[in-house]
Image (cartoon, coloured by chain):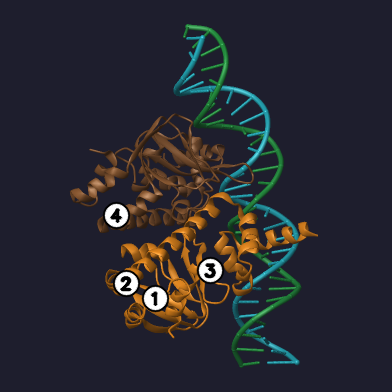
Chain colours: A orange, B brown, C cyan, D green
DNA sequence: ATAATTTCTTAACAAATGTCAATGAATGTG
DNA sequence: CACATTCATTGACATTTGTTAAGAAATTAT
């Protein structure tokens, strides 16, 4: 079975007719390590569901700092949003994204276009529900991201990852984790040292 | 006409039947300056549309820092999200909120409960569309908030407000603006001084 | 296995932001 | 009007984070 359909079935039971509708709209694509999957300034026209491999979305700010917006991968530890390569903001409004997406490994995805989703949600009430559940979840994630960035300092953000998403540390290099927290890699090193020191 | 219905009509044209459906679910409420409208740990069970007055949502972090999540008011300069008193995160999932909402002036609101919204959206396709447009907008706002917090430093955040929401500076005191940007009031003072100096 | 490359850590110093205390400005109250 | 209160600013100093440069550790290529 299609891995994306399979994923959806974890959350809702889809009648065969809806499942067929959906499967007919899906396309497949592969990227190589280092490929640009979507680039700043373009419109996010598709939702990509990751079948295998990992990626990240990022932004280079005015000072040239490279900041990781999110990590994207599919394994048994992934959170909901991690499975997808999409900027919902750009996708929903069909306006240019600020983010770039790059493959950190060879990647296989299942692709669903904006137009397909319009078609599917208007033809199937269940799929409309699925779509709205997905955007709710997307909302909750970005809400949490903003809340963490506003209320926690660098050390607390790192400890939050240690506590809630420790698997990120095995999967992504420290300098990427640092850019996700919003600090320089050297600062993260220093924080890690302080933390291990205080634990003894 | 009800100010909330009036507001909705700016975005979609509502047939009379839907308008009546909606008006029947609305209730009215007032708060005095300083009142706690919703408190951390409680479930956000209503969407409040502000008719008059201003408020803010905030969080006190581990270090005792008081951080402003958002400002809430209704005038001709309000952005979409400013009109509402709601934590969508808590509202959508009906789980406890991390935020508190306090009135900064006497406030009048129009209130719509979670249950009412369930009823309205299942009975009217247009109102369902309205609700989904509203959550899209909410998504865009919180996305922007997270993006700013990740990619801009304190000075840039302040200049962003100067550029995009300068009216906030007349409406809310500097120490509240500082807590919205995520810095100490003294730091904001310093930044303001640097900015006016560099403009000459 | 060795060499080359990349990533991680460390230390010294610089820059940004926080803290504290004092003062001045603005506002509200009797 | 005088007084009290709250808010904004300022300066001195502390803390946090960034920057730079160097070397250690890990990874990749030959």
Give me the disc on residue A79: 3
Residue for badge 2:
A117
Real-space CA distance between mark 2 and mark 4, rounded to the nearest whole angstrom: 19 Å
Label 2 vs 3, first from the N-terminus: 3
Disc 3 with disc 1 on a shared chain: yes
Residue B126: quadrant of the picture = bottom left
Secondary element type, mark 1: loop
Residue for badge 4:
B130
**Could you say which is closer to the camera, residue A188 or residue D30?**
A188
Spot occupied by residue D25 in the image (x, y as percentages of width and height):
73, 75
Secondary element type, mark 2: helix
Spot occupied by residue B191 in the image (x, y as percentages of width and height):
50, 41
Give me the disc on residue A14: 1
Give me the disc on residue B113: none
Marked residue chain, label 4: B
Residue A192: quadrant of the picture = bottom right
Q: Residue at x 26, y 59 (%)?
A: B125
Disc 4 with disc 3 on a shared chain: no
Spot occupied by residue B18 in the image (x, y as percentages of width and height):
23, 50
Q: Residue at x 65, y 62 (%)?
A: A163
Is C24 on the left or on the right of B164, as rendered?
A: right
**Could you say which is closer to the camera, residue A137 or residue A175?**
A137
Are dots 2 and 3 in contact, CB under 8 Å?
Answer: no
């Amino acid at each position: 079975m299609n891995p994306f359909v399979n994923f959806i079935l974890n959350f809702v039971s889809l009648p065969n007719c809806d499942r067929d509708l959906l499967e007919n709209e899906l396309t497949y694509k592969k990227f190589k390590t280092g490929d640009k999957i979507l680039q700043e300034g373009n419109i996010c026209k598709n939702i990509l569901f990751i079948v295998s491999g990992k990626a990240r979305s990022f932004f280079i700010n005015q000072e040239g700092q490279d900041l990781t917006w999110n990590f994207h991968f599919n394994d048994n530890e992934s959170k909901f949003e991690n499975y997808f390569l999409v900027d919902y903001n750009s996708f929903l409004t069909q306006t240019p994204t600020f983010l770039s997406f790059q493959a950190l490994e060879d990647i296989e995805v299942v692709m669903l276009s904006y137009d397909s989703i319009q078609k599917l949600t208007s033809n199937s009430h269940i799929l409309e529900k699925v779509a709205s559940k997905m955007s709710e979840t997307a909302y909750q994630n970005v809400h949490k991201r903003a809340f963490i960035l506003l209320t926690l300092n660098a050390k607390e953000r790192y400890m939050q990852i240690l506590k809630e998403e420790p698997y990120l540390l095995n999967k992504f290099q420290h300098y990427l984790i640092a850019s996700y927290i919003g600090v320089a890699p050297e600062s993260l090193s220093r924080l890690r040292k302080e933390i291990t020191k205080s634990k003894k």
